[in-house]
Image: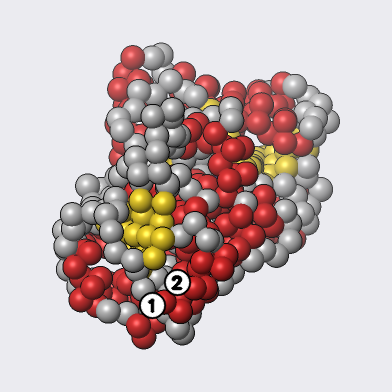
């Protein structure tokens, strides 16, 4: 599996225009419709005799649905088009009629085997008109599987926001490349399974990327025969307090589940004793380190000046939880900030709900403002670099929403930084392995932060073994 790359609508339009100029008219739509018809057949498991209802809007998205309907009708499906506009794709409609399809209405939906959402594609504005919404809701009430053409109609394609009612699909069949809405929540959750059909587009660098195992494999710092504990990296940990000693223990577990060779803990003796009880290999006290992880569980023990000194560099630093409150402007050190929505809202001085609704935008904004990579934790984790690059991690487990899970991530990302990865790579690899460990550890049941951390080596082994 390769990295999933998402492009903006503007990039897709430009790539399509180039290709459209080179190919006979209708070629791209035929490629799209063919891939769509095959995916629909695969979803429902049969085509001959299948009852297929197409919801058809005014644009080419409806055209794709109509031509897929033509192909399904030729294979023996009973295809009905419900037209949501009197400007529906004329040639597609004529072709469907010739193939034996017919024009139908809402009453065709309850008995259908599948409904195809060709209401709007990348030309759509967020939201559904009341008539379209009623049809979509009818299909949902009757449990009819929904296949979205290109994108679930009504979502914001370029941001993954869902400010208005929208389609919730079981399968989304997209063309040429992924769009941001396929990778970024809340829209990503409305896509169901996403299937990409190649239509031959020649695309520029992506707007957002989602890491796959292969990408992690290509970056993970695997030690070799020459490595020793110092060359593998030493991580300085400034975390935990008398108030929250557990955070330091958990962050250490997360770090030791990563590639680092050694951990130096900097903090009170009482916390060091707690860490040592679980991890006797930990070293207590200042010394040379290749990277820092600061913030988890510092609570009232937070020494803003000490954190500010680390933020001034030169070592790379992961800043989590309480450590984030020491940030008030651009960070000089190569830094990875790991806020959740509430912490990012505080950093940017905006309401939390804003960050939750528009995570991508706010992560980007913070990355630019603080000149640091920002990893915004959530059901989709967004990792934004100050140069505008974005990666997302979409394989999180809902069981990850547990106390201490963020401390594991901070430790792990620190470990990756200390072994030489850039903040952007450390964030992407860390988020991927953290989620992979959660899937292993939870296995459909609750997990604790410590079990999460102890599953990091197994998750890494699975990921690094092709
Ligand atoms: N351009 C191409 O070469 C290709 C395009 N393809 C398809 O074409 C789609 C884009 O087609 P279009 O550019 O025609 O745009 P759309 O099919 O997305 O629809 C745009 C139309 O819908 C109306 N509209 C916008 N928001 C709406 C809303 N919320 N509710 C109701 N109507 C709304 C607009 O007034 C406009 O007429 C892609 O998503 C894809 O499905 C594919 O066939 C592959 C090739
Ligand atoms: K659609």
Name the residue beneath numbered marker 1.
Answer: 268
| Residue at x-position 28% and y-position 59% | 287
Left/right placement of residue 401 relative to residue 144 reads left
Q: Which residue: 50% across, 53% down?
A: 256
Q: Where is residue 21 in the image (x, y as percent from the top left)?
A: 31, 18
Colouring convention used in this rendered image of the protein? secondary structure
Nearer to us in this view, 413 or 11: 413
Circle 1 residues within 10 Å: few <14, some 14–19, many ≥20: some
Residue at 25%, 48% in the rendered image:
388
Mark 2, residue position: 272
Residue at image coords 23%, 73%:
306
Circle 2 residues within 10 Å: few <14, some 14–19, many ≥20: many
* Quadrant of the rendered image containing residue 5: top left
Cα gap from disc 2 to disc 1, whole angstroms: 6 Å
Quadrant of image for the N terminus: top right
The location of residue 169, given as percent across then percent down, is: 62, 49
Q: Are marks 2 and 1 in contact (CB under 8 Å)?
A: yes
Q: Any mark on residue 199, and which? A: none
Report whether residue 394 is seen: no
Is the residue marked 1 within 8 Å of ligand 2, measured from its CB? no
Q: Is residue 319 left or right of residue 105?
A: left
In-front residue for pair 31/245: 245
Q: Which of 36 and 99 is in front in this view?
A: 36
Residue 185, x across and y down, in percent: 49, 56
* Label 2 SS: helix
Q: Nearer the viewer, residue 121 or 241?
A: 241
User: Could you tell whether 300 is left or right of 442 in the image?
Assistant: left
């Amino acid at each position: 599996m390769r990295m999933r790359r998402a492009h903006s609508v503007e990039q897709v339009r430009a790539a399509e225009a180039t290709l459209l100029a080179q190919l006979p008219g209708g070629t791209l739509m035929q490629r799209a419709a063919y891939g769509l018809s095959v995916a629909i057949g695969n979803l429902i498991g049969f085509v001959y005799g299948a009852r297929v209802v197409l919801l058809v809007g005014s644009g080419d998205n409806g055209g794709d649905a109509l031509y897929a309907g033509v192909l399904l009708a030729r294979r023996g499906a009973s295809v009905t088009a419900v037209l949501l506009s009197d400007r529906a794709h004329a040639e597609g409609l004529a072709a469907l009629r010739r193939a034996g399809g017919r024009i139908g209405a809402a009453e065709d939906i309850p008995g259908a085997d599948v409904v195809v959402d060709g209401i709007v594609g990348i030309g759509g504005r967020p939201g559904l008109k009341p008539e379209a919404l009623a049809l979509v809701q009818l299909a949902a009430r009757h449990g009819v599987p929904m296949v979205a053409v290109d994108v679930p109609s009504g979502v914001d394609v370029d941001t993954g926001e869902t400010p208005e009612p929208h389609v919730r699909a079981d399968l989304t069949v997209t063309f040429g490349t992924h769009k941001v809405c396929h990778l970024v929540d809340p829209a990503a959750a409305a896509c169901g399974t996403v299937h990409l059909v190649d239509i031959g587009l020649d695309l520029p660098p992506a707007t957002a990327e989602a890491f796959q195992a292969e990408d992690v494999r290509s970056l993970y710092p695997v030690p070799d025969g020459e490595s020793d504990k110092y060359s593998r990296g030493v991580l300085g940990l400034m975390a935990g307090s008398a108030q929250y000693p557990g955070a330091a223990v958990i962050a250490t577990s997360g770090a030791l589940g990563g590639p680092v060779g050694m951990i130096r803990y900097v903090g009170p003796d009482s916390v060091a004793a707690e860490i040592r009880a679980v991890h006797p290999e930990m070293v207590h006290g200042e010394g040379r380190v290749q990277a820092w992880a600061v913030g988890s569980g510092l609570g009232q023990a937070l020494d803003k000046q000490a954190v500010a000194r680390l933020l001034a560099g030169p070592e790379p630093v992961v800043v989590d939880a309480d450590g984030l409150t020491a940030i008030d402007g651009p960070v000089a050190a190569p830094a990875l900030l790991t806020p959740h929505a509430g912490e990012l809202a505080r950093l940017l001085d905006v309401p939390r709900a804003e960050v939750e609704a528009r995570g991508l935008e706010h992560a980007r904004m913070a990355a630019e403002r603080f000149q640091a990579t920002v990893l915004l934790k959530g059901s989709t984790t967004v990792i934004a670099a100050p140069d505008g690059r974005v990666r997302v991690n979409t394989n999180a487990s809902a069981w990850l929403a547990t106390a201490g899970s963020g401390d594991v991530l901070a430790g792990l990302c620190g470990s990756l930084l200390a072994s030489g990865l850039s903040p952007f790579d450390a964030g992407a690899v860390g988020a991927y392995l953290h989620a992979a460990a959660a899937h292993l550890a939870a296995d459909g049941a609750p997990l604790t932060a410590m079990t999460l951390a102890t599953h990091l080596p197994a998750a890494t082994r699975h990921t690094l073994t092709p």
